[in-house]
Image (cartoon, helix red, strand yellow):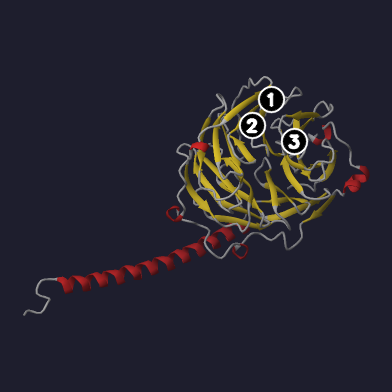
Amino acid sequence: MMNEPKLDRVFRGHTKSALNSLAVSPNMRQMVTGADDGAITLWNFQSGSRATRLEGHKGAVVFLKYNKTGDVLASCAEDRSVRLWVPRANGESVAFKGHSGTVRGCDFSSDNKLIVTASDDKLVKLWTLDKRRFQGALHGHLNWVRTVSFSPDNKQIISGGDDKMVFLWDTETRKHTFQFNDHDGAIRVLQFNKQGTTIMSGADDHAIKMWDARSHCLTQHYNAHNGPVTSLSQHKSGNYLASSSTDGTARLWDLRMGKLLYSMEGHKGAVSSCSFGSDGSFLATAGKDSTVLVWSTETDTTACPSFVSGLKGGEKPAVKGRAYGGKVRSAPTVAAKKPSADHRPPAAPQVTPSSLPMPMPPTAADTSGIIEEQGDASFSFSSSIGAAAPTAPGTADLTAVLTQVLSKLEGLTTTMDALSRRVQATESKLDLLNSTSSPGSGSGS
């Protein structure tokens, strides 16, 4: 069970500039933030040395992502570029320029061979990392694409944006294989769970939704926040999920029980991003108030002493965090309800591929990219990926799942009955046509 979070550190590295994204390195040695001032601030958790400022973008930095080994950092910005950084003080970087709009999201493949990017130009693009070459564009979205992610085995890609649609793609063929239309607002964040069996999303409709990646069925729905959901982060155990929102809160969810655990209030305004440390001992949140708050999120199984107890840098919150509004609220009864049929949309969430719009053919403008280097761009890559073991659901979860399955079976039975009646009616018509057109059926003269 996760213990009640406690505000432990406050970081401020951007002067009066709203923070848009936050990332913690897989080895937990560093934390980076991107802001409207176009800069990236890098903190070293181990040395506690002064924050480093990385500059290279000519517009607001809207998204940050480490590769799986933590030796390369990608930044997406309003200047229509993605930069790859060696996350050190000298600020070496190389730029990918292949989009015609703001680049809002990216992800690395788990083998560190590919990077995928999403942009306001309605395109998702694939690039190689070793030779830094453009591979191709994925066409299908009808509006800005805000988020994109690889599956853990790199065989699939998910993307979403302002057209309220989640697209599932085959990485090798770059073809669109499925589409989810369950959200009522722009999709802000998408990711697979650590096992690759579940797709998670957060959107402007204040909801978090989860689908089975194989059957494409909606499995969980949370009325999560009182504002758009801006980011999601999974705990290393796979049992907990953190979310942030423009409503000024970050929230912790128990995915096994399907309920809200804690709501954390500390930022003076929207919370734009959140990220667990790789050992699960802390959650960092970034806000439009230019601050980063680090909360201890220890569980009963967290090793002691925890990482947060030895963390260096930042400021200790004054008066137990009250100077920064560091409040933690237990789950309210209404928000803590387990997702059930009552929380799900009445219509079946599945959409058959045959009913989906065909992807548009690529244009000449989409088939090339420009790469610019800044400093020494000699990157080295290695693969590193881990997955937590799935946890068996409790009795309450099993009952809810069985209820859902039975409900779907009843719906399928009704559909099959209707199809059977149509087939019978069609056969009757064919028999009638055959009898009227057979020799000797007409009247002789």
Q: Quadrant of the C terminus?
A: bottom left
Query: Under tag 3, what secondary structure?
Result: loop
Identify which residue is drawn at 71% across, 27% down: 87
Q: Which of marks 2 and 3 is nearer the N terminus?
A: 3
Position above or below: 363 against 396:
above
Label 3 crowd (10 A; few <14 / some 14-19 / many >=20): some
- What amino acid type should be assigned to the residue bearing mark 2? Asn
Compare residues 388 and 289 and report the one nearer the observer.
Answer: 289
- What amino acid type should be assigned to the residue bearing mark 1? Val
Q: In the image, which disc is placed on residue 67?
A: 2
Q: In the image, which disc is placed on residue 86?
A: 1
Q: Earlier in the sequence, mark 1 or mark 2?
A: 2
Q: Which of marks 2 and 3 is in front?
A: 3
Identify which residue is drawn at 12% across, 76% down: 441
The x and y percentages for residue 6 are 83, 45
**Residue beneath disc 3:** 38
